[in-house]
Image (cartoon, rainbow, N blue to C red):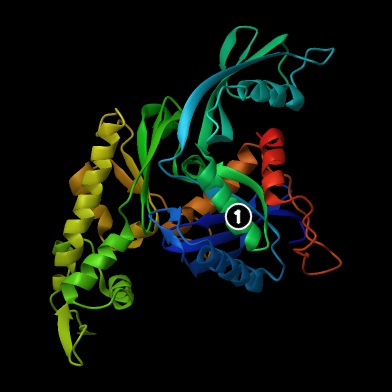
Amino acid sequence: MSNGGYIVTLDIGTSRVRLIVAEVHENGNIHIVGVGSAVSRGMKKGAIIDIDHAVQSIREAVDDAERMVGIEVSEVFVGISGNHVSLQPSHGVVAVSSEDREIGSQDIERVLQAARVIALPPEREIIEVMPKQFIVDGLDEIRDPHGMIGVRLEVDALIVTGAKTVIHNVLRCVERAELSVAGMLLLPMATSELCLSADEKNLGVVMADLGGGTTTISVFQHGHLAATAVIPVGGDNITNDIAIGLQTDTETAEKIKRQYGVASVKEASKEVTFQIRTIGSQREKSVTQWELAQIIEPRVEELFHLIQQQVEELGFSKNPVGGYVLTGGVMSLPHILTVAQDQLGQAVRVAVPDYIGVQDPSYTAGIGMVHYLLKRRMVRLVEPDTESPTRARKQKGPSPLERMKNWLSEFI
């Protein structure tokens, strides 16, 4: 890690906590140098229900990554999502400050700050400001006004807000895990940076992140995020169905799902068998992969039906022009794309990170945050300490709550 700085992202999921350490080279290339993963405890349906257990899971993921990279992680960017998140349009206007009327970074920051000035209920907090378009002296549809000449700079933006209770509980967990929060991001928007092309966003596309306890649905139209929602169904429901159907414990059911599970009965084999010990019995029984698929396929079909239903409830067509882009840990299940195409139509694809060591859809969100931060210029690269392989956690300065407030006013 000698050619540049690094970014650390934290994805606190219902089933796993994942931490990504990415090195950013001077030419802008990204290299994933460390990955930490731990079983997520203290989470249910995407919400924190036990802070102590959640903190323990975060620490395990951090320790896992630190052993791989050889440095001590002290600062992370955290992704946030959920039904408590809402989008609100806003508009900001400022005068270009430089004498030569060239628009610079300070002008863009000022106009985004102006867009933040909205009336909010006391229980809501701004997570992020996402510019939809800039307007320079009446000329609209500008994506990046850097270096342009003008007198008046405007922005049409989306204000992303969330429930203070949820946000502060996440901050508290990260703080008690002896980490500092460098910033919080809207996870669906960050994930889209890695999963979706500009054409897909312009045409209209639905992105679904199928996690362990929840499925996050995001609708993009005209190049921008139009709506997002979360349904409380995911891979854990498949595991529970297996546990009930085969009369075994959930830990065994999860192992069976990962080792023998396939999403489509047509693709399952009656020749592939495995032994399983049922609850309340010392005897083992033989189960075929075909029998296992009989349990898995109906739940997977229901999951895709719920995705379409949620898209319609958001007010959009269940058959978007750009189709569906699916990611998340559930999409690792063999032959699940076949079932998805049967349920959602042929315009369906799976998004998988293309990095050595993390070519798994369950890491899409964490890596997407890295891409999003760099594109939005929301991060200052951290140089590793050349005198010591570690960086002390105790020298953190302001509390995460204070850092969060400072970040929200500085990194837009």
Q: Is residue 211 above or below residue 293?
A: above
| Residue type, label 1 | Arg
Location of residue 43 (image quadrant): bottom left
- Residue 142 relative to residue 254: left or right: right
What x and y, as percent, mark residue 360?
44, 60
What x and y, as percent, mark residue 158?
52, 26
Query: Looking at the image, which residue is at 15% across and 84% down?
Result: 286
- Residue at the far bottom in the pictured view: 282
Query: Looking at the image, which residue is at 68% across and 37% down?
Result: 411
Task: Please give the count of numbered marks on the rendered protein.
Answer: 1
Location of residue 256 (image quadrant): bottom left
What x and y, as percent, mark residue 164?
54, 41
Q: Is residue 41 above or below residue 88?
A: below
Question: Does residue 20 appear in the picture of this structure?
Answer: yes
Query: Looking at the image, which residue is at 56% across and 13% down?
Result: 140
Q: Nearer the viewer, residue 100 or 310?
A: 310
Q: Quadrant of the N terminus?
A: bottom right
- Residue at the far right in the pictured view: 387
Q: Quadrant of the C terminus?
A: top right
Question: Does residue 186 appear in the picture of this structure?
Answer: no
- Residue 234 relative to residue 17: left or right: left
What x and y, as percent, mark residue 152?
69, 10
- Residue 370 relative to residue 255: left or right: right
Query: Looking at the image, which residue is at 77% across and 63% down?
Result: 394
Q: Nearer the viewer, residue 6 or 124?
A: 124
At mark 1, the secondary structure is helix
Q: Which class describes the residues within 10 Å of circle 1: few (<14), some (14-19), or many (20+)?
A: some
Query: Which residue is denoted by mark 1 in the rendering?
Result: 172
